[in-house]
Image (cartoon, rainbow, N blue to C red):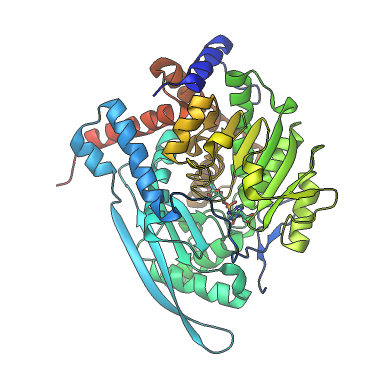
Amino acid sequence: MAKNSTKDLQKTASKNGSSKSAKATKKSSISRSNSSPKLEQKESNTSNSIETNQETTRASAYSVAQDQLKTVAGIMGLEDHLHQYLQVPQRELIVNFPVKMDDGSMKMFTGFRVHHNTIKGPTKGGIRYHPDVTLDECRALAMWMTWKCALMNLPYGGAKGGVVVKPDELSQRELEKLTRRYAAEISLFVGPERDIPAPDVGTNAQIMAWFMDTYSMHKGHSIPAVVTGKPVSVGGTAGREYATGLGITYCTRAVLNRCSGLTLEDSTVAIQGFGNVGSWTARTMDERGARVIAVSDQHGGIYNKNGLDPRHLMRYVAETGSVLDYPGSDRLTNQELLELDVDVLVPAALEGQITASNADRIRAKVIAEGANGPTTPEADKILDDKGVIIIPDILCNAGGVIVSYFEWVQGLQSFFWDEGNVRSRMQQTLTDNLDLVISNTVRTKQDLRTAAYMIAISRIVEAVEIRGFYP
Ligand code: NAD
């Protein structure tokens, strides 16, 4: 399993000191505004013309997740009964529900909520509004959340949910009704001690506020800790909106310094997806000296070899609904963006984007996985052979769930922290666990993904062994 990139990474990491800490170490538009954002970002998530790059379809994300587990279980010598226990979700809920539309008609929608594992505590995971949401996709994303929470040492298992819907085709009123009905339908599955949803693709702080309000109305009192990613005015935390992007920037900077001999300041970056994760990654990387030369959304991409201005571009997207035709940029396709000659590539859209069919054309030196599951196992092997370092999703994009955890803790205690405290604790948690992953890579001669999985799975197995299997 250890190939060129893994060896290079181990060599460089050892040379640089594996324990050295990082130096700093149509109708509705969905408002992403939260906390005290310097910028209010609005998105139009039109999803009619989604470009997909799948020799494996998105429905097979679950088999990708299971393959990843199987590989690591083999390397770790995981006992068969533990492998069987971890390879399937603990419980799954499918809901079909009606929503009365603005024109008076009634439309049926399908939603899901999946709990992968509860051995470490209540489950945690996003809610996705997207036309391609499936039960299998939720299973995969819930499993990845279990590993991510364990890797960050958070007292959670993994969950995921979603509704099959094109959110941009609904009015705000319809979106609110859909959210409230979905919240009511899955309310038997959620709760501050049971399962705590958060935003994901196609959802945002406003949707979390409606969800929280619905749940609270049913219980008869306000329960802010039932969801995270809420606006600060209703119990959200400072720093949640940009947390995932900032965490990706922290991880990328540390891995560049310690494993590749590059620095973020001297790096060029291309980012697929310019929603919450992609836009804040672009902005926080740019603020730390990187040159973001290409970004994309579902409509296509833009390029400027001298660098784009992410802060200004976020305003442009809020006004126009897309990155396309941003002044001073040239167009490129999502496929061309993935294959650009850049130092860092950040897939920050959907799963299954880097596959066996395009991996050999990827020219980036480092792939920082902002999205969950953007790289298939076949692509992993090809990229490792080419010497590309992949910062795996369960590490790279964990800044969001770390700050969600802080939001949940603050909500339970009704005691709120300042933004600096949130940021520094997030950075500490992320970089401490990044250090462990790099040390494990050096020790086991595995790539970063395998090393991260080994830590996550061994923490869960330890908890299983101590708790035992009920009854
Ligand atoms: P979002 O809805 O805010 O943005 C998604 C972006 O991807 C949009 O710009 C959309 O136009 C674009 N997109 C969709 N399909 C595309 C395609 N085929 N090619 C290029 N761009 C495409 O969603 P988000 O919250 O930014 O989530 C993005 C990814 O990050 C998802 O995989 C999500 O699971 C993961 N993630 C999100 C968070 C979070 O805090 N929001 C945390 C961890 C991981």
Q: Residue furthest top?
A: 15
Q: Which of 61 and 198 is in front in this view?
A: 61
Residue 201 at x, y percent in the picture? 55, 56
Position of residue 348 relative to residue 197, above or below, is above
- Indicate the quadrant where residue 280 lies: top right
Q: Quadrant of the N terminus?
A: top left
Q: Which of 266 and 155 is in front in this view?
A: 266
Q: Which of 391 and 305 is in front in this view?
A: 305
- Indicate the quadrant where residue 47 lies: bottom right
At 59% from the left and 35% from the top, the residue drawn is 362
At 52% from the left and 53% from the top, the residue drawn is 228
Q: Nearer the viewer, residue 121 or 203?
A: 203
Q: Residue furthest left?
A: 471
Q: Residue furthest right?
A: 328
Position of residue 25 relative to residue 102, above or below, is above
Residue 6 at x, y percent in the picture? 48, 21
Residue 3 at x, y percent in the picture? 45, 21
At 64% from the left and 53% from the top, the residue drawn is 275
Regarding residue 102, the answer to whether it shows in the image is: yes
- The number of numbered discs placed on residues in the rendered structure image is 0
